[in-house]
Image (cartoon, rainbow, N blue to C red):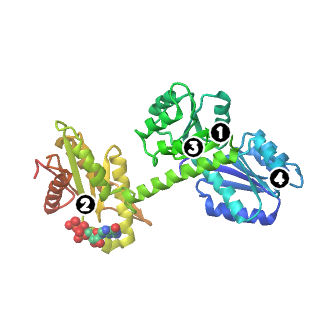
Amino acid sequence: MTGKKKRVLVVEDSPIVLKIIGHMVRQELDESLYEVDFVDSMAAASQLMEEHTYFAALADLNLPDAPNGEVVDSVLAKGIPCIVLTGTYSEERRESLLKLGIVDYVVKESRFSYAYAVKLVNRLALNEFIKVLVVEDSTTARNYVKGLLEQHLFQVLEAENGLQALDIYKQHPEIRLIITDYHMPEMDGFELVREIRGQSDKTDLAIIGLSSVEKSALSAKFIKNGANDFLQKPFFPEELHCRVIHNLESIELIQALNDAANSDYLTKLYNRRYLFDVGGAQYDHAQPNKPFAVALMDIDHFKAFNDNYGHEAGDAMLVHVGQLLKESFSRFLVARMGGEEFCVLLPGLSQNQAYTLMNNFRTRFEDEGMYLGDEYIQATISIGVTSMKGDNLDSMIATADELLYRAKEVGRNFVIGDDSA
Ligand SMILES: Nc1nc2c(ncn2[C@@H]2O[C@H](COP(=O)(O)OP(=O)(O)OP(=O)(O)O)[C@@H](O)[C@H]2O)c(=O)[nH]1
């Protein structure tokens, strides 16, 4: 990891609870991303907060030197998102904690509560990169929702009606969640949902509709129009947070499944299936008057490489090729076809341009080997590159394959293009 680690403070006086949280931290928080400090008193926590900048804190409400939640106040006063650990639960306690602006509270009941608290830290780190659009004409209601989302570190954008929301969504297509009211001037919530669903489906963008209790039929209508979920007003902060997290996690899960289905497990490049699905569509929709090149490449004598250095070293070499390809062709679709064969689609590139890029890659690969323990090992690659358009992507790949075969025939570590064939 290149950036600085995020620092998390845990303040808890019970040794047993500290031990369990320590275990959860090791299980849930990647140590290359987080640095966690454990202390058992307000005095020690105050000292550390003077010395470091914290990303988040888990703080016990009752400490021997701070029996009335003073540590929570001081964590919040420093602007640190705070997850409160409390031994007891009561309605008054809950209300007073929420008023303070904490991220969440966790009743110290079982290891599941501690797991929840620790996982929340990870969630906050993800939230920092997520844009949420709040669409609501009442400033008070909008600010309320915005404030709750900001406690969970989301980047919040605001719109007063559906039309404004559409405009903002156009400017920020990376928005992952829209929370929208129903009654608004210019364009109401239903119309907004219908419009948005014409552009993005439920697996790319979540929409939560807000409706009042008196008009509970609105909730069903929101869903029928394409919202992922709804929330009846007035709602508790916890309800909003749970719905938000639940909907984002669903999208993230689907995204992860899609990624797994489309990528190669070893090199993390796209796989053959993705190449033919997405690359095939790219080819079919390419402008007929524009060039389109396809390169197919294969590591030389890879069987011998495996025999000499072992299968694991072979795997490492495949990952190495994948990394170099990603770096060298970041603008283009790169896929692992299977085995030691890779493909790059180069829409818009002429034969000459594609040939030059491929030859540069060939020499780069030849020059930049990799370390296997202390040993520096190198390999070479042969490439076939064509810009002769066929009926479809398959036929171009077949042509590139013939050229690749020629590159092997003439001695390997070679690029063969249409002209040189
Ligand atoms: N380590 C490793 N090896 C693989 C993987 N997939 C395929 N291979 C090996 O790649 C080798 C490909 O060998 P061949 O097709 O005979 O070709 P080659 O030895 O590279 O020879 P040329 O292509 O003619 O230069 C086989 O030994 C496969 O076992 C993989 O995922 N990991």
Q: Amino acid at mark 2?
A: Asp
Rendered location of residue 211, percent (x, y)? 61, 39
Q: Amino acid at mark 1?
A: Glu
Closer mark to the observer between disc 2 and disc 4: 4
Q: Amino acid at mark 3?
A: Ser
User: Which residue is identified by label 4?
Assistant: 90
Please tell me which of labels 1 and 4 falls first in the chain.
4
The answer to whether residue 304 is visible is: no
Rendered location of residue 294, percent (x, y)? 22, 49
The answer to whether residue 325 is visible is: yes
Viewer-side residue, 406 vs 273: 273
Measured in 3D between alpha carbons, the distance from the residue under mark 2 to the one under mark 1, in whole angstroms, is 66 Å
Viewer-side residue, 300 vs 185: 185
Closer mark to the observer between disc 1 and disc 3: 1
Say left or right for 66 vs 339.
Answer: right
User: Which residue is identified by label 3?
Assistant: 219
User: Which residue is identified by label 2?
Assistant: 298
Q: Amino acid at mark 4?
A: Ser
Q: Which mark is residue 362?
A: none
Please tell me which of labels 4 and 3 falls first in the chain.
4
Local crowd size for mark 4, using a 10 Å CA cut-off: few (<14), some (14–19), many (≥20):
few
Determine whether the residue tagged by mark 1 lies in a helix, strand or loop: helix
Identify whether 139 is placed above or below 200: above
Closer mark to the observer between disc 4 and disc 3: 3
